[in-house]
Image (cartoon, coloured by chain):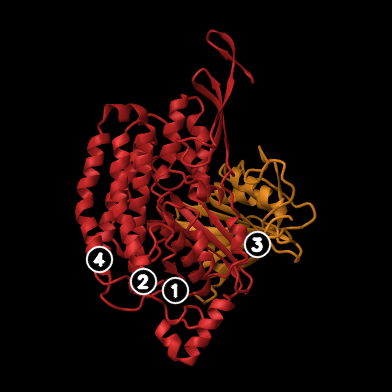
Chain colours: A orange, B red
Amino acid sequence: MTETPDLEQNPIIAKIRGWRPVAVAGLISFRGELTVVVYPEHLRPLTEFLKSDPDLAFTYLSDVTGVDRFPIEPRFELNYHLLSLSRRETIRLSVRLPGENPVIDSVVPVWPTANWHEREIFDLFGIRFEGHPNLRRMMMPDDWEGYPLRKDYPVEGPR
Amino acid sequence: MTTVQTATGLEQTMVLNMGPQHPSTHGVLRVLLELDGEIIVKADVDIGYLHTGIEKTAEALTYSQAITITDRMDYLAPLSNNLAYCLAVEKLLDLEVPKRAQYIRVLLTELTRIGSHLVWLGTHAIDLGAMSVFLYCFREREELLKIFELVSGQRMMTSYFRIGGLALDPPVGWTDHVQKIVQTFPSRFDEYEELLTRNRIWLGRTQGVGVLTAEDAIALGVSGPSLRGSGVDYDVRKYFPYSRYDEFDFQVPVRTEGDCYARYLCRVAEMRESLRIVRQALEKIPPDGPVKADAPGIVPPQREKMKTEMEALIYHFKIFTEGFAPPPGEVYQRIESPRGELGCFLASDGSPKPYRMRIRAPSFVNLQALQKMIEGRLVADAIACIGTLDIVLGEIDR
């Protein structure tokens, strides 16, 4: 799958651009997967639109993933993997957050499944989710200092 | 402690700590139960006791080395984990796997599914008091573990699927052993059903217990038999087929009641469907052909060639010291593991080590539904609900 389809012809992209063109920072098509790079302040409204619009119907959130791109700024990348059960289609939303005080609106009101995903990302990356009902550590002990999955955290742990 | 208004006046609740060391939590899971008598008023699930930093470790290993740690996440279905990771790397590399390898992968993954469901059935049944089922299930599982040992040398942590195909060609005559399984297992499944499906105690403990509606299940991101027991037919093998699953004829059992009994029936039916797939795979596997892709810089050469040809030796050396570097990019590969949608997200920066390997563990997401299932119910139902979700702490905590 090495051909690059004309992404602007993609109906999902057209709908998003029709809804709010300023939200889209970029588009990537790689190995048959579509990624929409979104500005952080537009992410939460976009997710509400993608879930509620009957032609898109992305009612299922598969996964929320964090990536630390240290030392590139903006440092943190969040990827939301969405699935439309009725249309059997998937899409990825990608946002970049700065390393200094990374905060973004929580999508728990849109998809309750994001609850634990966002908690895990907070625990291991230190990204805060505004509006999350229960943002506290889950994998690491409650009093742990540091965010293990960050690139400047050693693999062997603090010594 | 909070106070609850009950029919007889104000009462106090008691916080009971279940786990992390507990025979019925299927691993190191801690559930804080706030009880009003025997009714669970509030449940708080606490995980992280088995967190070993697998995702962080993978960033320090090459792509081939990381296969070995993927086994250890969902330790009841190690070949599923291998498959998800290998497919993700192959997607990243845009590498085509030979047909023979793909059919063998399907066959072994379905045997893994049966093995995992057998453990689920045995442990779920023994939690609820049906002790004989446990031993019968493990007797059958032994036959499957013998097959895994035959092809890969390992009973559980096989690391048998490699990037580009399989680690080695299965030994001659292995299909006879699989044939024996295909012939004997259906009657064994009938035996389990005879013990449980119309058993009054089983029905009493599982019917109407832990009901999850379809809307709640979708909202909570539940997948696998836990979702299909609630009426949603999402199965990754049918929605987004991989490894030639679209060439196989099988059904996806779906029920609508959404209780523990529905999930039990789904999984038992799935075991039978897996046998159907195995039977078809046995016919489809070509008698000969390569089991590794022809990609010299990625797939290690055969040992005989490595010992006689210079280019093969150089490739071998480079692959095992430096590793191969896929192009930069991100992929997300989903497969249907016995527990649900197992996703492997890989971010590559063009170096031989995965920049980020993220495993979307189905049990991690399914466990969120536990709170909804047990609040308002009896303590004994909590045991049934934990069992019915079929969780494996290895993949929850990673």
Is A8 on the left-hand or right-hand side of A76?
left
Amino acid beneath label 3: Val
**Chain of the residue where label 2 is placed in the rendered structure:** B
- Tell me the number on the disc at residue A37: 3
Q: Which type of secondary structure does the marked residue at label 2 adopt?
A: helix
Which residue in the protein does label 1 denote? Answer: B164
Amino acid beneath label 2: Ala
Is B382 on the left-hand or right-hand side of B257?
right
- Tell me if residue A59 can be seen: no
From the viewer's perspective, is residue B140 above or below residue A8?
above
Within the image, what quadrant is residue B112 found in? bottom left
Within the image, what quadrant is residue B198 found in? top left
Which residue in the protein does label 4 denote? Answer: B175
From the viewer's perspective, is residue B17 above or below residue B271?
above
Contact, CB < 8 Å: mark 1 with mark 4? no
Label 4 and label 2: CA atoms lie apart by 14 Å
Q: State the image coordinates of residue B232 (x, y, percent, origin top left).
A: 40, 45
Other-residue count near label 2 (Cα within 10 Å), few / some / many at <14 / 14–19 / ≥20: many
Q: Earlier in the sequence, mark 4 or mark 2?
A: 2
Label 2 and label 1: CA atoms lie apart by 9 Å
**Chain of the residue where label 1 is placed in the rendered structure:** B
Q: State the image coordinates of residue A114 (x, y, percent, origin top left).
A: 59, 46
Contact, CB < 8 Å: mark 2 with mark 1? yes
Contact, CB < 8 Å: mark 3 with mark 2? no
Other-residue count near label 3 (Cα within 10 Å), few / some / many at <14 / 14–19 / ≥20: many
**Chain of the residue where label 3 is placed in the rendered structure:** A
- Tell me if residue A3 can be seen: yes
Nearer the observer: mark 4 or 2; the answer is: 4
- The quarter in which the C terminus of chain A is drawn is bottom right
Which residue in the protein does label 2 denote? Answer: B101
Q: Which type of secondary structure does the marked residue at label 1 adopt?
A: loop
